[in-house]
Image (spheres, helix red, strand yellow):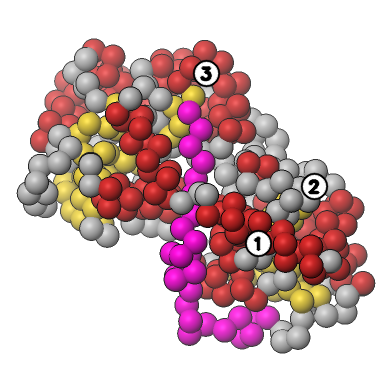
Amino acid sequence: MADRPADGKPCFAFVIPWPIDTAGGVNHVIHHLARECKVDGKYEPLYLESCWEYTKPVEDWVDGVRRIRFRMRAPVYEGNRWAPEYVAYLPGEIATWRRVIRENRIQAINPYFPALYQFTVALLRATGFFKGKFIPTFQGSDVRIAITTARIEGALLSWMLHQADAIVACSRGLGDELLAFDSSLAPKMTPILNGVSVEDFLARRDNGFDPAAVIPEGRRLILNVAGYEYRKGHDLLLSAFAGLSKEWDNLHLAIVGAKGPELEKTRAQVAELGLNGRVSLLVNEPYNRIPAYMARSDVFVLTSRWIKGKMGEGLPLALLEAGAAGVPVVSTRSTGVEEIVTDGVNGRVVPVEDIPALASAIRDVLSRPVEAKRWAEELRKRAAEFSWRSRWQLYREICEA
């Protein structure tokens, strides 16, 4: 068993259904909040990880934060199928949670990707056996899953959320989507927009990496950073770029993203549009190369789709990172975008699926360097407002309300 902090501080527990020590946007958020929690000093951060392999709690450390892994059961599975073993194991499940809460002096439980694997926590909250704060946080796809969930599972999830002290959504737009699932949750809804550390993002740059190794010299660069998925709209970007490439002989497009189901379709579209040599599709690049690509680019473009209740962003961190890097941006009007970018003030925002408008906005940035520089500077100021410290303080206020 890992040693507990000697000062006996109360713990703020971040709960997740996957390994915290893997790459991913939600893990990125949690790591930053945990770090600010630790620096603040009021609470000790703690990771609680749902892991079916461990029938009893097992402790270790991840980047200076204690992690406890154990099996977290859900009352239903595969939509509407009851899990009878949940009832059979419920006394032991309750005993495990109460032990973890008591021994670690947990005063707040903050689940990410809220789902029925935290149902036991809601039971403890409802019956008074857990008197701390219960604060589920939604980041994007978890809301869309909740909206489309099956009847029994949906009813249990709604009851679970009603036991919360506050329900956090990482953007106001995402919070509105969640209220379509259950409008009676409105009094508990609290938007806490995700953040960015300008200094940390720039400091992460791999100074040994030169984008010239993959991007031809002397070309103006359009950059997109997003996984190869349909909702990221790479097909829209390629169609817009096809027209722009005829106006600028020295224009180049780079898409940096994790391998996904749309990768081969994207490659085929590049060939079909005759853009080989003008487009670089970069797959599974290390995160510390992103600042270098940002610094090399003339404009950052986000083309995410938004179909309310089905797909979209939560809050696009890539726009905040572009702001940190001082790069002008063009974005489609996806979830949370207009909570960061105001069209014509600190970037350009265009309707989703509107390829001519997308091309026109990119052209606007490329052909108006003075305006583009001003937009980039205004976005940098906006990004500075989203410090992780300020994000953590909002969680602390919920704990102390």
To which residue does mark 2 refer?
Answer: 350
The residue sitting at 61% across, 81% down in the picture is 211
Question: Is residue 12 in view?
Answer: yes
The residue nearer to you, when weighing 306 against 188, is 188
Determine the CA span between mark 2 and mark 3.
29 Å
To which residue does mark 1 refer?
Answer: 377
- 182 horizontally vs 275: left or right: left
Residues tagged 1 and 3 counted as in contact (Cβ below 8 A) = no
Q: Identify residue type, mark 2.
A: Val
Q: Position of residue 318 (x, y in %)?
A: 59, 56
Numbered range of the magenta stretch = 190-215
The residue nearer to you, when weighing 215 against 396, is 396
Residue 192: in magenta span: yes
Q: Position of residue 282 (x, y in %)?
A: 62, 71
Q: Identify residue type, mark 3.
A: Ala
Q: Identify residue type, mark 1.
A: Glu
Residues tagged 1 and 2 counted as in contact (Cβ below 8 A) = no
The residue sitting at 47% across, 77% down in the picture is 206
